[in-house]
Image (cartoon, helix red, strand yellow):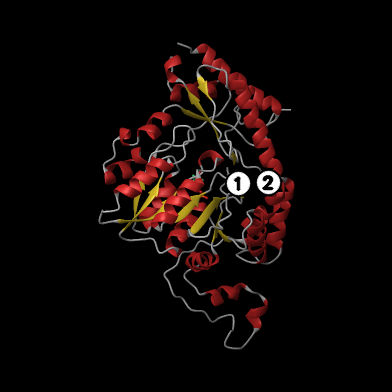
Amino acid sequence: MASTRTRGILPFAPPNITDDDIDEVVAALRSGWITTGPRTRLFEQKFAELVSVPSALAVNSCTAALHVALSALNIGEGVDVITTPMTFCSTVHVIEQVGARPILVDVDRATLNVDPDLVARQVESRKRGDRRIAALMPVHYAGQPCELDPLLDIAAAHDLAVIEDSAHALPAWYRDHIVGDVSHPSVRRAVAFSFYATKNLTTGEGGMLVAAPDVLEAARVWSLHGMSRDAWRRYDVERQYEADEDAAWRYDVGLPGFKYNMSDLQAALGLSQLPRLSSVHQRRREIARQYVDAFEDVESLEVPFVRSDVSHAWHLFALRLNLETLRIDRAEFIAHLLERGIAASVHFIPIHVLSYYRDRYGYAPDDLPVAWREYQRLVSLPIYPQLHDDDVEDVINAVLDVVACNRR
Ligand SMILES: *Cc1c(COP(=O)(O)O)cnc(C)c1O
């Protein structure tokens, strides 16, 4: 049995929604509580347990989680934040939005994660400059954790915060730690996850932040209008009927905060998805293994490199083309796959060639040569648990056929 195709095309990343998921959302709708409430609190607790931290903050996107993390860490006007060009634009947008300046540092060719040696060099070279680097914002590209130990060492030595964009890395492990475990003796850390429609776990739209307790509480205030923690309790149904000075209607606002809270409808979906995260991950790993087995000896293809000290979340399977062996470029390769019924994508168009960043900071494509070169070879293949073995075979056959028909 093959997966559902739309007009004969195997989709790139359809959302993974079961009948149980739908029932849970309906139950939330019927509960009489549809904004942030008991289901959101429970989802935060369960998620915190999953990544081995005491607490978590549910918000309405990963972008929101990154934004409130920067705000909670007081990162804003006059400071710089080091990040990667190989990401979705919102990672970098939030740095701009708080008034800080993003510094793009090139990636490691093998993993496409930010290169710790280049980060160290950037930090060293700026020691005498007039602007301070305040934070590192690495991205766990495709679901493979970055080299966190060297990055945390740099952060500890230079008093930088580390905010990880973990939109792809659920679940993933770096050495003995699950990504999201923010325990570290001397670095202020925050990790942001995405529950966007296509991500490994979805709430339709949604995100989660984990951080040290004080940072997390500050982020919680930023995420809901800047209302104080006591005000947050106005969502406690029982207290609505208390009449003392702690009454439900009383609140204070200490900051011009955002409106980023998760709703119980989203949390209901998240709670329903959490128990199958590990089987979903298992299936993603199997598919990645099948692709690697099929492609690793093909001259025109380069399969993803996986470090031996990580466990990969396999949000993306980013194949690379050895273009010198082919008569077609990457765009044509994707068009040929589509002709064979397979939808593919590209992750990512490097940030520095997007017109806003190119024009604002005067980047040329070759200023970040690794990101620019590798971008031109990247093709993301479908990888999601609804794929059946014969779908995976269809993808493999289509890729091999495009290669065979277009060899130089
Ligand atoms: C999806 C994604 C985001 C944004 O997630 P939202 O939940 O849609 O805000 C951020 N960074 C990366 C790397 C992503 O892939």
Q: Is the residue 22 above or below the residue 55 in the image? A: above
Q: Position of residue 172 (x, y in %)?
A: 60, 44
Q: Position of residue 171 (x, y in %)?
A: 62, 46
Given residues 120 and 314, the one toward you in this image is 120
Q: Is the residue 215 above or below the residue 163 in the image? A: below
Count of labels in the image: 2
Is mark 1 in CB contact (under 8 Å) with mark 2?
yes
Given residues 402 and 350, the one toward you in this image is 350
- Who's the residue at 65% across and 82% down the image? 241
- Who's the residue at 65% across and 42% down the image? 16
- Who's the residue at 54% across and 74% down the image? 229
Image position of 217 (left or right of 102) = right
Given residues 83 and 159, the one toward you in this image is 159
Q: Position of residue 246 (x, y in %)?
A: 58, 84
What residue type is disc 1 on? Leu
Q: Circle 1 sits in a helix, a strand or a loop, which is it?
A: loop
Image position of 44 (left or right of 347) = right
Residue that label 1 marks: 170
Image quadrant containing the C terminus: top left
Disc assigned to residue 151: none
The mark that comes first in sequence, 1 or 2, is: 1
Residue that label 2 marks: 277
Image quadrant containing the N terminus: top right
Q: Dividing the picture into quarters, in which one does residue 206 lie?
A: bottom right
Mark yes or no: residue 13 visible.
yes
Q: Is the residue 163 above or below the residue 18 in the image? A: below
Given residues 13 and 29, the one toward you in this image is 13
- Measured Cα–Cα span from mark 1 to mark 2: 8 Å
Q: Is the residue 54 above or below the residue 365 in the image? A: below
